[in-house]
């Protein structure tokens, strides 16, 4: 693949964001669970009196029973989750009843809805805001899909647009632009069943790239525009942020595990040794010494002492096409989304697969943007093991559970509407749609 001829700004160094105080936070300890293809991580934390987050317990296990974000073996997944949560509970000396979980299953999709609600010249109140949110949720719940997030991006009161909070403003019509993230209902039911088998209830489900953005983007990047790309083991997800909001998200069925399988197939070796080769000798960029450096590779079915010798260049040539394919797909998704300048000129790579040498430089060339490696926010009490990019989603889930990243902190957008108001809403929309 030819390099992009345009001038590329140099990649920048890794910058772990400093956490901002959580101003609208919940009381008491709470737990989060990051269920991935290659690992499961659980964090128990609380918000201190100064608004900062403290980690009370942490646990992690090798991922089992999942593939590409979906549950494929309930028993294996249950065992991994139980062990992981148990580690965190023992460390925190707390028993969890409910937990916040990441969403990667069911091919999540990102959609935008524009809705209008007649106010009639009075001041907009909380029920008016709930009406448009509930209607967005109703419209999204079609064709076997279920909405997970209904995120108001902005409102317009009559001719005045870009209104962040319309409550108290007088208007005839309230217009809302909603960002809805949904997934297949059946995959969601399987996820819920798996967590319930672990004697836990799902308190909230959070989009994985949304969580990754909360933990790895600095406030200026969320404000001015940036794309966070979470390169996990089984999937790669991305989220576009601007004006402190997530505008778009997408998931790709490609991840670090696919690179490992490519190596295992290409070198006729085991998955375990392919992972070791990737970790110790893997690179996306070729070097002059690669042809001369020979690596020992045990062949499948051969005795342990029978090793083949392959040049390091062969490992690089197997790894590079899969990473190029990943960034080609990301570029296509960004172009299709049509966000243009709103996506900014900044890309933050996170997730365990982003640590592969040369990935950052390749992303800068292929995406024609500034690129850095993003680590999760600094959290007091978090073990050093969990401070790398592989745990960005888990740290972001903890921030979300504490109250970060949400609009309308002082009202519950999911609260049920009064039955009379709901009937009036349905009748009104039938007349206008």
Image (cartoon, rainbow, N blue to C red):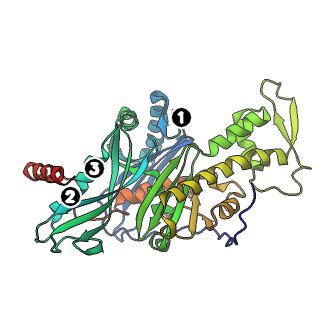
- Depth check: 334 or 209 in front? 334
Is tag 2's residue or tag 3's residue first in the polypeptide sequence? 2
Residue 295 image offset from top left, x and y in percent: 85, 43
Residue denoted by label 3 = 137
**Between marks 2 and 3, how big is the CA–CA gap?**
10 Å
Please tell me which residue is depicted at 64% across the width and 41% down the height of the picture: 258
Relative to 105, residue 177 above or below: below
**Between marks 1 and 3, how big is the CA–CA gap?**
32 Å
Residue 202 image offset from top left, x and y in percent: 33, 43
Q: Quadrant of residue 14?
A: bottom right
Please state which of the two labelled residues, at mark 2 or mark 1, is closer to the viewer. 2
Residue 424 image offset from top left, x and y in percent: 10, 52
- Depth check: 334 or 390 in front? 334
Q: Relative to 94, is 362 on the left or the right?
A: right
SS at mark 2 in the image:
helix
Is tag 2's residue or tag 1's residue first in the polypeptide sequence? 1
Q: Relative to 276, is 191 on the left or the right?
A: left
Q: Are marks 1 and 3 in contact (CB under 8 Å)?
A: no
- Depth check: 34 or 348 in front? 348
Tell me the crowding category of disc 2: few under 14, some 14 to 19, or many 20 or more residues within 10 angstroms, Cα based: some
Whether residue 374 can be seen here: no
Residue 64's disc number: 1
Please tell me which residue is depicted at 27% across the width and 53% down the height of the picture: 136
Q: Relative to 64, is 97 on the left or the right?
A: left
Residue denoted by label 2 = 130
Tally of numbered discs: 3
Please state which of the two labelled residues, at mark 1 or mark 3, is closer to the viewer. 3
């Amino acid at each position: 693949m030819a390099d992009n001829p345009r001038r590329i700004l140099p990649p920048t160094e890794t910058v772990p964001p400093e956490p901002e105080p959580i101003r609208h936070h919940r009381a008491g300890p709470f737990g989060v669970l990051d269920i991935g293809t290659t690992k499961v991580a659980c964090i128990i934390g609380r918000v201190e009196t100064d608004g900062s987050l403290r980690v009370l317990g942490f646990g992690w296990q090798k991922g089992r029973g999942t593939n590409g974000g979906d549950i494929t073996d309930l028993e294996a997944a249950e065992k991994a989750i139980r062990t992981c949560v148990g580690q965190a509970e023992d460390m925190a000396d707390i028993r969890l009843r409910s937990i916040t979980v990441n969403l990667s299953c069911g091919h999540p999709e990102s959609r935008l809805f524009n809705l209008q609600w007649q106010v009639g010249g009075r001041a907009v109140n909380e029920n008016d805001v709930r009406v448009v949110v509930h209607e967005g949720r109703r419209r999204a719940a079609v064709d076997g899909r279920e909405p997970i997030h209904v995120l108001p991006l902005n409102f317009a009161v009559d001719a005045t647009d870009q209104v962040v909070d319309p409550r108290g403003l007088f208007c005839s019509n309230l217009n809302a632009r909603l960002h809805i993230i949904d997934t297949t209902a059946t995959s969601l039911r399987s996820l819920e069943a798996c967590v319930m088998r672990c004697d836990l209830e799902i308190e909230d489900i959070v989009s994985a790239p949304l969580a990754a953005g909360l933990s790895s983007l600095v406030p200026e990047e969320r404000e001015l525009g940036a794309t966070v790309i979470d390169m996990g083991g089984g999937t790669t997800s991305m989220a576009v942020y601007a004006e402190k909001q997530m505008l778009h998200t997408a998931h790709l069925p490609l991840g670090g595990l696919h690179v490992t399988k490519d190596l295992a197939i290409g070198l006729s070796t085991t998955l375990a040794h392919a992972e070791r080769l990737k970790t110790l000798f893997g690179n996306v960029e070729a070097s002059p010494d690669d042809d001369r450096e020979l690596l020992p590779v045990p062949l499948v079915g051969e005795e342990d002492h029978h090793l083949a010798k392959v040049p390091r260049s062969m490992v690089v040539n197997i790894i590079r096409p899969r990473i190029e394919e990943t960034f080609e797909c990301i570029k296509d998704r960004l172009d299709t989304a049509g966000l243009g300048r709103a996506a900014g000129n900044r890309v933050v790579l996170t997730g365990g697969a982003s640590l592969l040498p040369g990935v950052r430089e390749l992303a800068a060339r292929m995406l024609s943007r500034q690129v850095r490696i993003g680590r999760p926010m600094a959290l007091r009490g978090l073990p050093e093991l969990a401070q790398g990019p592989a745990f960005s989603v888990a740290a972001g889930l903890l921030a979300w559970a504490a109250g970060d990243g949400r609009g309308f902190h002082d009202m519950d957008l999911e609260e049920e509407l009064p039955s009379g108001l709901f009937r009036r809403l349905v009748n009104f929309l039938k007349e206008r749609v």
